[in-house]
Amino acid sequence: MKITGIELRRIAMPLRAPFRTSFGVETDRDVLLVRVVTPEGEGWGECVAMSEPRYCSEYVDGAQDVLRRFLIPELPELSESADAFAVKRALKPFKGHKMAKAALETAVLDAQLRSTNQSFGTYLGADRDRVPCGVSVGIMDSIPELLDAVEGFIAEGYVRIKLKIEPGWDVAPVRAVRERFGDDLLLQVDANAAYTLADARHLAKLDAFDLLLIEQPLADDDLVQHAALARQLATPVCLDESIESAEDAAAAITLGAASIINIKPGRVGGYLEAKAIHDLCVAHGVPVWCGGMLETGLGRAANVALAALPGFTLPGDTSGSSRYFATDITAPFELADGHLDVPTGPGLGVAPVTDILDEVTTSTEWIKL
Ligand code: OSB
Ligand code: MG
């Protein structure tokens, strides 16, 4: 596939409500979109890096810089028949920057699949036409406020609730949600690395609430300590931030640091690596689920396709567009009976609505190849 140029477009998407985690509060999503142009068409990739390096070391200005300065200049070196695998190989010598790499690889893959009339779901190996959806619920100022939010999401049909936790906001909110909504509610928590192994006895109090999992309780680079913690908890330990590659996943499984893995394509460098982690986890009997990064409809489309692979046996953070945005840049993803349909059109199967996209655009940069 010959790529003639690439557009880096920044958009500003106001969130419907502030989203608070143990690492910060988001009120607007500053998103970098990558559009690859070929003689036959185009392809889109959404970069999930956030404004500040708090979830991981990447941030959106840095992602745009590394794309412009190092990653995109590798593309002209590829042959005209290059595909997403060739792009992944070409970017490998550059360390890190998984979210920037993922956005570029996804845009190339989208262009490739549109040109061969294949959907992301079919290409990746989806075996379902819809996926059950969970929702991630931020840290709130009070428990009544949290209960109202959870009640609203359950009424919308979400089949699984994930509560963000941090020291001082853990056992009490979990107990309150469990007591109010009952034992049948699928419930899990996400600490975004806010605890240390010294908190093991405190975290074990969560064992009383029959959680599906506790996500990333300890620091990103603490696989050995996660393994030690897992031995002290009945609640399964799931890793998010710690897993940036299939090698990381293999290490975590071997060490006993995780019995469940959250796969986020941006965090691991793209959908090809995400698929490799899925395959590895299936081979080891480790359940996976698809995480989210407050994506627009473009990123959401690809995530929903990934979440339809057979190893994704737990509901993901694949919420509807309205979870975060009053107006999405694509036709909105809407829950039906707690599920989202896997797009069936070529590539991502969705495209930005031009007028809406232009309205939220804050800058564009054209790189001619
Ligand atoms: O840890 O899963 C996380 C959002 C931003 C950064 C990290 C995380 C999250 C979420 C929300 O939990 C996921 C979503 O609904 O898109
Ligand atoms: Mg997480």
Image (cartoon, grey):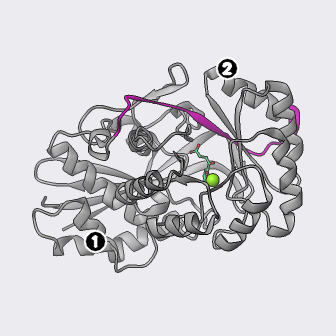
Query: In terms of sequence position, does the residue under pointer 2 or pointer 1 come before the other?
Result: 1
- Image quadrant where residue 2 sits: bottom left
Query: Could you classify mark 1 by the number of other residues whose Cα lies within 10 Å: few (under 14), some (14-19), or many (20 or more)?
Result: few
Q: In screen coordinates, is 185 left or right of 293?
A: right
Foreground: disc 2 or disc 1 = 1
Circle 2 Cα neighbour tier, 10 Å, few/some/many (<14 / 14–19 / ≥20): few
Residue highlighted by disc 1: 89
Vertical placement of residue 198 versus 318, above or below:
below
Residue 155: which disc? 2
Compared across the picture, whether 63 is left or right of 79 comes to right
Q: Quadrant of residue 218?
A: bottom right
15 horizontally vs 329: left or right: right
Is 141 part of what is drawn in magenta?
A: yes
Q: What span is in magenta?
A: 126-144
Q: Quick one: quadrant of the C terminus?
A: bottom left
Q: Secondary structure at mark 2?
A: helix
Residue 145's image quarter?
A: top right
